[in-house]
Image: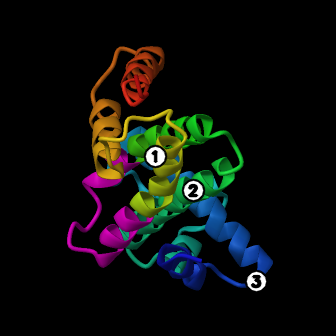
Amino acid sequence: MTDTDSALIAQRPHRADARRNFDALLAAAREAFAAHGSTASLEDIARRAGVGIGTLYRNFPTRDALIEAVYVDEVESVVRAARDAESLEPWDALDTWLHRFVSYIGTKHALLDGLNKDSPVLLTCRTAIYDSGSPLLERAQKSGEVRDDVVIGDVVRMVSGIAGVAFEDDAQRTKVVELAIDGLRAR
């Protein structure tokens, strides 16, 4: 279990009904923040989750707490994706994880304005992402499928930079990300 896993689990309620509300609020907040940025209406988020505003504030006393929880949840999903991909062939594992990472970048950009840049959670999350992707990259390098002159920081920056650019549509973004990822292949 990583530090980010224990941080979110400590916040997650123990009762099943409260946990469902917590998870519904995270899902509704993720959608609202993606659509309207970090200034999305908290009342709208509660309504989307099917709970009252009081339930939202009991779980997330501030907007910052909600934004941070959505961010941590997304990072945990990226970490889980790396674990899930471990059973694939080396190149497929890295490629699968990088595509999940690209979708995380979209959420990250929607939340970036609302995140406290001085939060220790951000550093922990960054470390968790690097630590989850690094073994996949190293395994693909050892198999001879990926260039040996790159490190996980290079790959994350490359994919983040591309995923963060405005594209005409998702198909164009996918095409450009695919071109970049293909550039990692050993020649």
- Against 21, residue 93 (above or below) is above
Q: Answer whether labels 3 and 1 touch (C-beta < 8 Å).
A: no
Q: Residue at (46%, 42%) from the top-left corner? A: 141
Label 3 packing within 10 angstroms: few (<14), some (14-19), many (20+): few
Left or right of 12? Residue 121 is: left
Label 2 packing within 10 angstroms: few (<14), some (14-19), many (20+): some
- Against 173, residue 117 (above or below) is below
Q: Which residue is mark 1?
A: 104
Q: Which of marks 1 and 3 precedes in the sequence?
A: 3
User: Residue 96 colored magenta?
Assistant: no
Q: Which residue is mark 2?
A: 77
Q: Answer whether labels 3 and 2 touch (C-beta < 8 Å).
A: no
- Against 126, residue 187 (above or below) is above
x, y percentage for residue 72?
Answer: 46, 65
Question: Which amino acid type is shown beneath numbered disc 1?
Answer: Tyr
Magenta segment = 108-128
Q: Which of marks 1 and 2 precedes in the sequence?
A: 2
Which callout, 3 or 2, points to the residue nearer the camera? Answer: 2
x, y percentage for residue 140?
Answer: 52, 42
Q: CA distance from mark 2 to mark 1?
A: 8 Å
Count of numbered badges drawn on the protein:
3
Q: Indicate the quadrant containing the C terminus: top left, top right, bottom left or bottom right.
A: top left
Q: CA distance from mark 3 to mark 1?
A: 28 Å
Q: Which residue is mark 3?
A: 15
x, y percentage for residue 45?
Answer: 52, 55
Residue 51, located in which quarter of the rendered image? bottom right
Q: Which of marks 2 and 3 precedes in the sequence?
A: 3
* Residue 170 visible, this angle: yes
Question: Which amino acid type is shown beneath numbered disc 2?
Answer: Ser
Q: Residue at (47%, 68%) from the top-left corner? A: 69
